Amino acid sequence: MVHEKEDGVSTATTSDIGTGMDYQKKAREHLWLHFSRMGNYSDEHEIPIIARGEGPYVYDDKGNRHLDGLSGLFCCNAGHGRTEYGEAAARQIEELDFFVLWSYAHPRAIELATKIASLTPGDLNKVFFTDGGSEAVESALKLARNYHRMRGNGQKAKHIAREVAYHGTTLGALSATGIPDLRAQFEPLAPGGCHVPNTNIYRWPEDHDPVWAAEAIEERILFEGPETVAAVILEPVQNAGGCFVPPDGYFQKVREICDKYDVLLISDEVICAWGRLGHFFGCERFDYQPDIITSAKALTSAYIPMGAMIASDRVAAPFMEGDASFAHGFTFAGHPVAAAVALANIDAFEREDLCGNVLRNEGAFRGMLETLHDIPIVGDVRGAGYFQAIELVKDKDTKETFNHEEAEHLLRGFLSGELYNRGLICRTDDRGDPVIQLAPPLICGPEQFEEIHDVLRPVLTEASKMIRD
């Protein structure tokens, strides 16, 4: 059943998504939400229930429309409600519902791997499918260790990542993640994770050399011992902390350092691939050649779970000879239905030039966010493509940030709920300093940017007054 609101927008109601079930009650009783404080939900503080999606918008179970300013979680890049993806899945189920990639292949996996290889830069031609991003990172870290072992360098087992960076939740990926609060509950972690400064240029001293953070990687390699370091893993634009972009020359210096010490460079593009930065792969945006790319999320625009680790011919070579094997895999990786949806998704990207849409409109998107600088609480605006962040500060002149209690009150006590109630889904995050992150679907343009502005401005203005009072 579809209902029309007064403005003519069709909406879903609770009767559309069930048969009288009390979703709030049942969700609290049975559904364990991820990264969520379950004890905070009650009759007075309901769980947001999203019932329907269309284009750049989603609708909750009460029929309210929200602009999906986070693309689900940086992944619904082609927007919601593309029925052709479901049709591709249905056709695949009729032909072949499932077969494992362990010692077998199937047509869709072959076609998708070939298509991905045609889009990747350089010699990144070997595609190892996974079910998601953490699995892709886990696979890359295991491959890096095994690659060096296959070449007689078995001591090379450590990996270097950046402080505050997020690389996943499995124990191996978590060892690369540089967020103490996420790590503490699960320690001791898989060994080998080492961390260096990130590229939060907003908080660098003014006299810092643009590539000092890259040079810190070399210093850490030397400290650990080059003979023990297998890989460096970096996002093109670091997500956690709020869209940290690299300074000019950063990745070129990192590539030089990795080559110097026989260390693999892993480009973690679980977020930054598939158009988020205006290119199929984020490394293209900053003109560097990795040895491995990790990918997931928008590979299918999140219509179905899928990930991939993409390795260079050089890195894959030791496993392609004789009786060698990379003894690693997942039952559902490269699932025929997921591969069919991914092919339909990439076809939509190319047919509609979604990467081009980002490049044509990112200036307008960023320009809109820059207009918010007159609000006292807005300290920095940064990012690339359709991946932008606003850092919030107590004092613009000194860049003073908020303490834990203040950030808790600001983000979770006010901003998160108020932005959602006014029709904008985005991310309020304090894994570093407090930020608001925005990553709308790649189909968006000036109309949606204006909607984002019309929510952000009054809410941030109110928050700013609240802080001063």
Image (cartoon, rainbow, N blue to C red):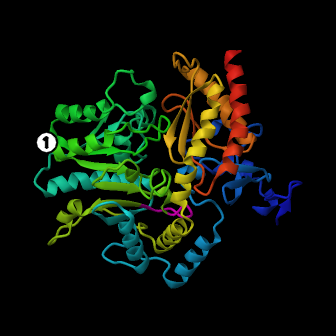
Which residue is more in the foreground, 355 or 176?
355
- Start-end of magenta stretch: 300-307
Q: Is residue 318 above or below residue 160?
A: below
Q: Is residue 295 left or right of residue 76?
A: left
Residue 395 point in image, percent of width and height: 57, 17
Q: Is residue 187 above or below residue 394?
A: below
Q: Residue furthest bottom?
A: 95
Q: Is there any visible trace of residue 163 in the rendered image? A: yes
Q: Is residue 452 left or right of residue 339?
A: right
Q: Is residue 109 above or below residue 405?
A: below
Residue assigned mark 1: 227
The answer to whether residue 299 is magenta is: no
Q: Residue furthest right?
A: 6
Q: Is there any visible trace of residue 18 in the rendered image? A: no
Q: Is residue 317 left or right of residue 332?
A: left
**Residue positioned 51% across, 58% down in the render:** 355
Q: Is residue 51 left or right of residue 242?
A: right
Dividing the picture into quadrants, the one containing residue 81 is bottom right
Residue 97 point in image, percent of width and height: 50, 78
The local secondary structure at tag 1 comes to helix
Which residue is more in the foreground, 461 or 188?
461
Which amino acid, mark 1?
Glu
Q: Main secondary structure of the magenta part?
A: loop
Which residue is more in the foreground, 118 or 53?
118
Locate the N terminus and report the quarter of the image it occupies. bottom right
**Residue positioned 41% across, 51% down in the render:** 282
Residue 296 point in image, percent of width and height: 45, 57
The answer to whether residue 305 is magenta is: yes
Residue 112 point in image, percent of width and height: 42, 72
